[in-house]
Amino acid sequence: MGIVLLIVSVTLALVCLLGMAKATSPLVRTALAILAPSLIGLGLAVCSVVYVPSDKTGIVTKHAFGSSLKDGKIIAVDGEMGVQADVLPPGWHFGYWPVIYSVSNVDLVSVESDDVGLIETADGIPLEGDQLFAPDFPPAEFQQMLDARHFLTTGKGFKGKQASVLKPGRYRLNTRLYKVTMVKQTEILSGEVGVLKANYGKPPSMTMTPPPAPAEAGQPAQPEDPVKFAADGEMGIRAEVLPPGKYAINTDAFTVTEMWTTQIIAHYTQHAAAAAASNKASASPSAGEEKEITVRTTDGFTFPVDVRVEYLIKPQDAPLVVAKLGDDEGERFRNALNSAVRAIFRNNAENVKALDYVQMRSHQESQSLAMLRSQMARFGVTVTAVRIGNVGDELSLGTLLKTQTDRELAKQEQQTFQEQQKAANQKKELTRTTQEAEEERKLATATYEVKIADEAQKRKVIEAKAEAEATKIKAVAQAEAYKQIAEQIGKSNAALMEVLKIVGERNIQIAPRVLVTGQARDGGASALVGTLLDRITAEDEQQSKAASPR
């Protein structure tokens, strides 16, 4: 466009000059003489103007009136011919005449929120030695290092892939120097940590010595080789891990290994073995499942054991795991774990008999756990539990287990018989004790009855003596009284009074016997006595009849 304007302006100036030759008026010739150079100057000025929109960056290339670039340089910083380091910001710019300069507008470099921009420069100082990446930009000069002139001069930037990256945002870059490739940010999920391995820098300087390897029988523990970790600016595995989150990491300059820090379970089961056997391609079992472990005991039995190993990788141990075994889901890691588990279980089984192995499962678990913890600690893996599931099967331990079952049943039957015999003896002893107690009770009762009878007899004797004494006293008193009455009224009358007294006490009817006798002297007394005797005799007969059984 600028060249077209320049040609138009020169053409108009020539027209003006031709018009001066034909013009007759001095005034016209003067005007044309002034207009011709003005058109040329205006054309030159207009054609040197360039415009850069607000969302663009102007890249300037110089084609003439300058020296050539030397030493393989691509970007000019001292007015040489070629792509200029300085770029044009938005707006109007003058002095960029056609043929000498060309200006191309390019888009701003835009990094989206989930992306990161990887930088590669086309010019700069060659990288040192066998380095593949330039070191990070100094934090205080990061923005200045994105200016091509500063990068190539004061900043002393290196040519090639840069370790520094562009975070989300918009950047006005000289795209002939800076080539930017967009990649996704690195995301560390919950339950994981990220282990960084720098692919550039000086040799690592930080040293860590893992726990020694477990000692073989009769041999001292073998020390582990120290592991080198890298600090900032050094090549190798970083000792500090990345917690869950998103990070703007140069995935070319750094290798990020994501490691699980949650509990993981490795299964060694018959199910996994069957699945592997059915696979014609002989592919390895799925992640977390391996073939069951086959052990051989000291008495010659060979049988499979289902085992479950629970382990985790602590965040602070993740760099050691990466340095020793690589990825926690990789082949090196699985081989190390499988080798340790199988060797420990097979070695432990060699020292016991098959039946003891079956019956002492908890001992095998605790023993294997202690040994496996020691073995895997040198790799940075923490083993938390070892569980033993099924031990053997019908084919390998069927006869042994049946013999043991029969033995247990016989033992149980013997114990049952002994318990029954013990119960019978106890029952017999209880019966004897009960009988003895009953006899003791009867003997005590008889003893008490004898004592009671003896005491009753003594009481009766005492009562009889008392009654006799009382009767005697009463008789003496009555005799004395009767004697005194007889002396006063006569013996006959005294006897009659006693008879009447008895008649009154017993309510005896005396009229018939009195009437029958009809005697005057002592006849009444005789009648009364006879009537009294009859009544007493009748009462005694009635009492005898009532007492006799029918």
Image (tube, rainbow, N blue to C red):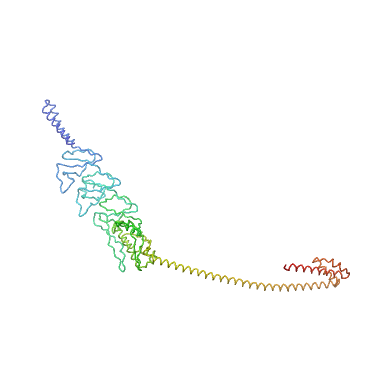
Which residue is pictured at 61% across the width and 71% down the height? 442
- Relative to 419, 63 lies left or right: left
Query: Does the rendering let one see residue 7?
Result: yes
Point out residue 133 in the picture as x, y percentages from the top left corner. Answer: 23, 52
Quarter of the picture holding the C terminus: bottom right
Image quarter for residue 454? bottom right
Of 458 and 512, nearer the camera is: 512
Query: Does the rendering let one see residue 365?
Result: no
Quarter of the picture holding the N terminus: top left
Point out residue 25 in the picture as x, y percentages from the top left corner. Answer: 12, 25
Point out residue 330 in the picture as x, y percentages from the top left corner. Answer: 29, 56
- Relative to 272, 25 lies left or right: left
**Furthest residue in direction left, as rendered:** 21
Image quarter for residue 50? top left
Image quarter for residue 208? bottom left
- Relative to 28, 317 lies left or right: right
**Furthest residue in direction right, as rendered:** 520
Of 461 and 163, nearer the camera is: 461
Q: Is residue 193 above or below residue 526?
A: above
Q: Total label count?
A: 0
Point out residue 401 in the picture as x, y percentages from the top left corner. Answer: 40, 65
Q: Is residue 89 above or below residue 471?
A: above
Of 29 and 118, nearer the camera is: 118
- Relative to 547, 319 lies left or right: left
